[in-house]
Image (spheres, rainbow, N blue to C red):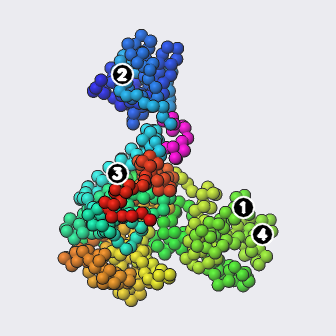
Amino acid sequence: MKNYTHHNNELRKNHINENVYLKGWVAKKRNLGGLIFIDLRDRFGITQLVVRPESPSYEEASSVKSEYLIEAKGIVKLRESVNPQLPTGEIEVDVLELSIINTAKIPPFTISDKEAVSEEVALKYRYLDLRRPLQQQYILKRSEITKNIRHSLEDLGFLELETPYLVKTTPEGAKEFLVPSRLYHGEAYALAQSPQIFKQLYMVAGFERYFQIARCFRDEDLRSDRQLEFTQVDIEASFVDQDDIMSMTEKVIENLMKLLNKNIKFPLKRMSYKEAFDSYGSDKPDIRYELKIENFNDTFKGFEIPIFKDKVLRGFTLENNALFTRKYFDKLTEEVKKNHGDTLAYLKLENGQLSGSISKFVNATIMKENTVMLIIPGTYDGSTQAAGAIRKTIARDLGMIDESKDELLWVTDFPLLEYDETENRFYAKHHPFTSPKDANELKNNPKDALAKAYDLVWNGYEVGGGSIRIYDQEVQMLMFETLGFTEEQIKEKFGFFVEALQYGTPPHGGIALGLDRIVMLATKTENIKDVVAFPKTQSAKDLMMMSPSKVDEVSLKELGLKVE
């Protein structure tokens, strides 16, 4: 058969008595008193077929099993018993002809959203897992979002251009994947962590507005919102400042929010990095709930508490709740220690009785009745970061987060550099091509220098990060020197780029939006693997392809490699 007339979520009452041709997979088959009912599935949905004993295709239909691929010709009829769960639930197709396009083995799990499937099995048979309606919706929504973003950027005058995947290794940033060269033994390419240098070179070349739906590669530990390979919407523009890039990005995001039917006010809120870290303990604060970090040094002034001596004290005051038990405080203490805090001290005032880990050192006058106080001693950075970590846990456990709500904001004025006490050197907070707000500050007081950098945050996830770039070769050389690179290292690692800056480079800047995270948040799933068609496991394995796998001796020899 050919010339299929409809997909399987299309037929309604207004199609009754029409002749139709359909195709799809057998989602379910039932034989009820001689009548054979088949739920036919494609990526659009389900249509019920009915095959009667007098049909010439009855024998063929009898042999059909789950996940067989079939095609059918028939007449649309009104169902005797309506299925309100299906958009096509008022009709069925009375089959005149049916043929099997291809048979199928019994699948290792039912292709249904109702059956729970272990991640190991689902990823091993990912091509079957992707037949499940929910999984298909994730991937279809990804396609829809990508299309929407692409059209928004095209409407803003951006050109879709490509950049190489095989690039030169760089000393900064996350660990890279190396690709050994067959032609030059002992040498290797790196898989691009991002198109950063190339998109800047497009600006040097005069293209002015570039974007790319770019694949990027980082050899990092995986987590719920990170994969080894990921996709970002890479954007760069010339003759712009920070406000221009943020404004253009907001137009893209505003169009996306309309597509998603989300009510977000534009322009978006802006918050400095300093405020975000001080109030929320994070540079990607979730502001859907009001739970700000407090300072407790004045509260405990005059009390001799050994674990508080010479420490910054940060934490929270909360209304008492049945959740706050000794076991729960122990759970929070473990989280504090994992996130650079010294420990967690706590107090509870109930019916005039003060209890808690430091209750013997203080009196009840420092707190209100029926409240709990959580105090984290440590350095300012350590205690604040730990408070930020337990803030998220407490909010989730107390049901403080309105999951139907979405909050987006910009975080700006990041530190330009980070200082590593162990290595006694500076690292770039973003990357070494980020412009300082003040070049003199970079030269004379690098520790306090701020960057022309900005992150887009959605419900506590960073979904975009960018900066205005350095376009002056003298400032770029100053940045390299501040990062501790020798002239030889600069020439070896970035020589071509430094040279390019000497040929009339325009002021420019950009942003990269994390497509995977955007789709994850748009579809309200909590794991990025759901919105990536063929993801790796948490332990960085591809269970379907059984990868990574051993390299044979012939290939190793050809590459000039030996495994130790």
Q: Main secondary structure of the magenta part?
A: loop
Q: Which residues are magenta?
A: 109-122
Front position among marks 4 and 1: 1
Nearest to N terminus: mark 2 or mark 3: 2
- Which amino acid is tagged 1? Lys
Residue position marked by numbered label 4 in the rendering: 355
- Label disc, if present, on residue 99 of the rendered structure: 2
- Label disc, if present, on residue 40 of the rendered structure: none
Quadrant assignment, res 344: bottom right
- Which amino acid is tagged 3? Thr
Nearest to N terminus: mark 3 or mark 4: 3
Residue position marked by numbered label 3 in the rendering: 146
With 553 as the anchor, is 394 left or right in this view?
right
Above or below residue 57? Residue 301 is: below
Q: In whole angstroms, how far apart are the C-alphas of marks 2 and 1? A: 62 Å
Nearest to N terminus: mark 4 or mark 1: 1
Residue position marked by numbered label 1 in the rendering: 327
Q: Give the quarter of the figure containing the C terminus.
A: bottom left
What residue is drawn where x is 31% and y is 27%?
5
- Which amino acid is tagged 4? Ser
Provide residue 264's location: percent of width, then percent of height.
43, 56
Provide residue 216's location: percent of width, then percent of height.
36, 60
- Which amino acid is tagged 2? Ser
With 479 as the anchor, is 284 left or right in this view?
right
Q: In whole angstroms, how far apart are the C-alphas of marks 4 and 1? A: 14 Å
Q: Is residue 90 visible?
A: no
Quadrant assignment, res 245: bottom left
What residue is drawn where x is 35% and y is 27%?
101
Q: Is residue 528 magenta?
A: no
